[in-house]
Amino acid sequence: MKYQSFLIKYAEIGIKGKNRHIFEEALVRQIKHALKPCEGNFAVHRTYGRVFVECLSDYDYSEVTEALSRVFGISGICPIVETPVVPIEELRKAAADFMKEEYPEREATFKVHARRLNKEYPLDSMKVNEELGEAVLDACPNLTVDVHKPEIMLHVEIREKIYIYSTIIPGPGGLPVGVGGKAMLLLSGGIDSPVAGYMIAKRGVKLDAVYFNAPPYTSERALQKVVDLASQVAAYTGPIWLHNINFTEIQLYIYEKCPHDELTIIMRRFMMRIAERLAKESECLALITGESIGQVASQTMTALGVTNEVCTLPVFRPLIGFDKEEIVKVSKKIGTFETSILPYEDCCTIFVAKHPVTKPRLDVIKRHEKNLDEKIDEMVERAIATDEIMIVGKDETRIVKQRDGELQI
Ligand code: ATP
Ligand code: MG
């Protein structure tokens, strides 16, 4: 079947009134971005409070529907056949042909739902329903009418053209990326943080990300794994600015100066401090982590409280009440799982203590952090100044700042 366009459905809760156009413009922008790599020409526009993707050339149906099904804000994608505003006899034929092609064999019940928005059309929607129901019954012996619980619907909208559709491909829901501002994701190579980023982005938040790298204790492959994860998340969010921070010096210094059972917690406090600095510099309004209560020693409520103490920005932890199984389920759905389980070492796993504290005391931790006073400030400044920045998209990654260079976009 050759569909000429796609009607994009979106949830309207919370977007009525004066914010609606902001939402719709962001949705159009994100759809255009998602379609860029697809074969073919498309026009994306808003008409009468609806968003349409018009196909101006040949295109690959599954490529386009897959791209659209990753755009947050879309709740459904309806492939449409269009006709000019034709008399009912011709519309009967168009509807019957459509259903014959759409459901050549499937035995099912159906119902027609016509909407006459163009009041010049001579028949009202009830009458159109009757006419088209009859035409489909005549043409498709495998279909029967059930107006109460139909298995399939035939939607017909009479506007400046007539739009016919039946299939609704589910979208990811949420809000279009960008309407909610920007946040900084602490992205490690694990299962959790990509899922956390996905969940916050789904609420309309654009993502930047930071990875704390510990070469030579961690390899190039560990970095590549994080870049790959960012790229998989970027398939939903659009390009992500990824900061690659060299954390080795800080980690070794903590290792040298602080009690080993407190390493993880102190290290995490420095990660948060640095992430917050980067966040503020790039106008991010919050931090995001993949933490979940009790998952590991550094994620008991006490430990989370001690980590959180260094932050002034809100820290979003969307997985806080999730079991690992639930997180894995989302990571499989969004396509990050297989990359996340690759066995490359993470900076935290290398410096981890045998028996990390599960109930760190803030006053004790602060006292031990004093052991770092001599050099830690300059180390933090150096780590931030020598960050490497990449723009990671779904299909390409571009380094825009080398460790010893200036930002070059
Ligand atoms: P993940 O599966 O995302 O790696 P995890 O279960 O390994 O999480 P931790 O290592 O305790 O848990 O890290 C908790 C959170 O801290 C991560 O979800 C991530 O947001 C952040 N984080 C940990 N290590 C790093 C790192 N090297 N770079 C950036 N963020 C990190
Ligand atoms: Mg981890």
Image (cartoon, grey):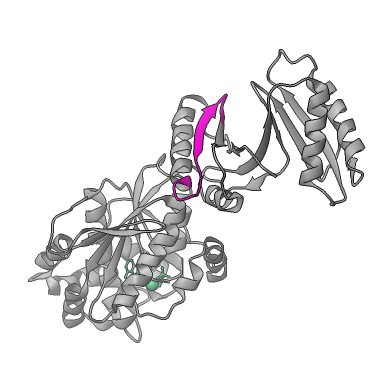
Which image quarter has ligand 2? bottom left
Q: Is residue 59 covered in magenta?
A: no
What x and y, as percent, mark residue 296? 42, 75
For the magenta stretch, what is the residue range? 35-50
Snapshot quadrant of residue 83: top right
Residue 310 visible to an observer of this rendering: no
207 and 64: which is toward the camera: 64
What x and y, as percent, mark residue 369? 18, 71
Question: Would you say 58 lies left or right of 359 here?
Answer: right
Please give the count of numbered marks on the rendered protein: 0
78 and 271: which is toward the camera: 78
For the N terminus, the image quarter is top right
Residue lying at 30% horizontally and 72% vertically, measured from the top left: 265
Question: Would you say 268 lies left or right of 54 here?
Answer: left
Snapshot quadrant of residue 153: top right
Residue lying at 32% horizontally and 46% vertically, measured from the top left: 285
Question: Would you say 23 lies left or right of 407 here?
Answer: right
Residue positioned most to the left: 374
What x and y, as percent, mark residue 78? 65, 41
Q: Is residue 46 covered in magenta?
A: yes
What x and y, as percent, mark residue 307? 31, 64
Residue 25 visible to an observer of this rendering: yes
53 and 406: which is toward the camera: 53
Residue lying at 60% horizontally and 49% vertically, measured from the top left: 61
